[in-house]
Each structure stands twice: as C-alpha cells, then as structure tokens.
Amino acid sequence: MSCNESDLMTRRQALKALAAVSVCPLLLNCEFVNFHGEVVEESTFSLSDPAMEALEEIGGRVCYEHGSRGILLIRVSEEEILGFDQICPHQDQPLGLCSGDTSNALWDQDQQTLTCPWHESVFAADGSVVGGPSPDPIETYRVEFDPQTGEATVFST
Ligand code: FES
C-alpha cells in the first residue's frame, strides 16, 4: 500500500481527534489535548510577570511554556495577543525564542504575517499559509487578553 503526504496528514489529524475524544471525558478540570497529543490545562499569565514584559509593546513577543514545545506569543495590537505553535509545520524547525533557540521568526506588523526564519514560509494571523514552501498551516492558540488588567488566558485553539 502506498502512503502519500495527504494520507499522513489525514491520519495525523484523525489521531489527534481520537486522542481528544478519548481523554477529555476522563478529565475533571478544564484541560485539553493540544496539537501534539499532550493533555495540558488552560493557563493564564499577566503582563506584570517580568517574563512576559515584552508583550507590553506592540510587536513584542515571548516564548510561553505551554506543553512541551512552547507557544510563540506576539502582541499584535493594543487589544490582541496571538499564539502560534513554536514549531513550523514545514520541516518542524523552531520559530525562535523558546529553549534558548536563537532563530527568530519575523512578524510583519503591517501585513499581519509571520515568516519562518528557516525557509521563509509565511503564515497569516489565523495560521493559514500565504507564502513559501509549507504545505500546511501553522497551529494557533486562542489567547483572550484584557488590556485593562494585563491578564490573559491561553486556550487550545
Ligand atoms: S521549517 Fe519553516 S519554512 Fe521550513
């Protein structure tokens, strides 16, 4: 039996969905299965945390530890923080800032796009591919942010 790339992606997505269905009913707290099959809890952070202070500026970014791979958080406006998976879907390379990695994805504030530093795949704010070699969108995480309090919650999608 042959196995092409679209078959693999379909199987990967099916496995993630199966993991979510299998695990969620067993959980008592507000947890979810992330894109990598890990069970993680929703989490909150505050801009008053020195580790998050880069998000006080529009265009600022930090690596947020959330699951084993981390999330690249970017402050894109006064009211909005975006969360991107730390690993590019093209060749599973890091986007930067997490785990001491020195690569640095480029956020274009005018275009509202993220460019991977490795082969220049370009992703829109919703994770969709708008340029470059990646055949797949990058995973995104929903971030609810209150600019009045500086408090934020990170969800799975
Ligand atoms: S790893 Fe990101 S574009 Fe290749």
Image (cartoon, rainbow, N blue to C red):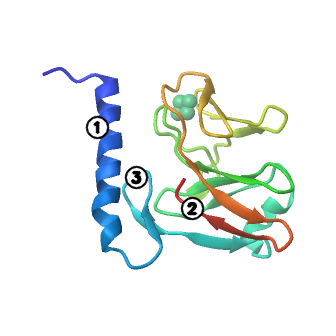
Give the residue number, with chain letter if any, for mark 1: 11
Q: Are marks 3 and 2 in contact (CB under 8 Å)?
A: no
Q: Amino acid at mark 3?
A: His
Q: Is residue 152 left or right of residue 118?
A: right
- The residue beneath circle 2 is 155
Q: Secondary structure at mark 2?
A: loop
Q: Circle 3 sits on which residue?
A: 36
Amino acid, disc 1: Arg
Q: Is residue 48 above or below residue 93?
A: below
Tell me where residue 10 sits by quadrant: top left
- Spot occupied by residue 155 in the image (x, y as percentages of width and height): 57, 61
Which x, y percent locates residue 113?
72, 34
Kindly identify the residue that appears in the image at 60 percent across and 38 percent down: 127
Eye-nearest disc, 3 or 1: 1
| Residue 30 location (% of width, % of height) | 47, 73
Q: Please state which amino acid type lies under the numbered disc 2.
A: Phe
Q: Quadrant of ligand 1?
A: top right
The first of marks 3 and 2 along the sequence is 3
Q: Classify mark 1: helix, strand or loop.
A: helix
Q: Residue at x 34, y 49 (%)?
A: 16
Task: Determine the CA span between mark 2 and mark 1.
Answer: 24 Å
Instruction: Name the residue furthest left.
Output: 1
Q: Is residue 121 visible?
A: no
Q: Which of pointers 2 and 1 lies earlier in the amino acid sequence?
A: 1
Q: Which mark is residue 116?
A: none
Determine the residue positioned at 66% across, 59% down. Answer: 143
Q: Does mark 3's beta carbon lie closer than 8 Å to ligand 1?
A: no
Hey, which quadrant is residue 149 in on the image?
A: bottom right
Q: Residues within 10 Å of mark 3 (few under 14, many from 20)?
A: few
- Horizontal placement of 78 versus 143: left or right? right
User: Could you tell me which secondary element the residue under label 3 belongs to?
Assistant: loop
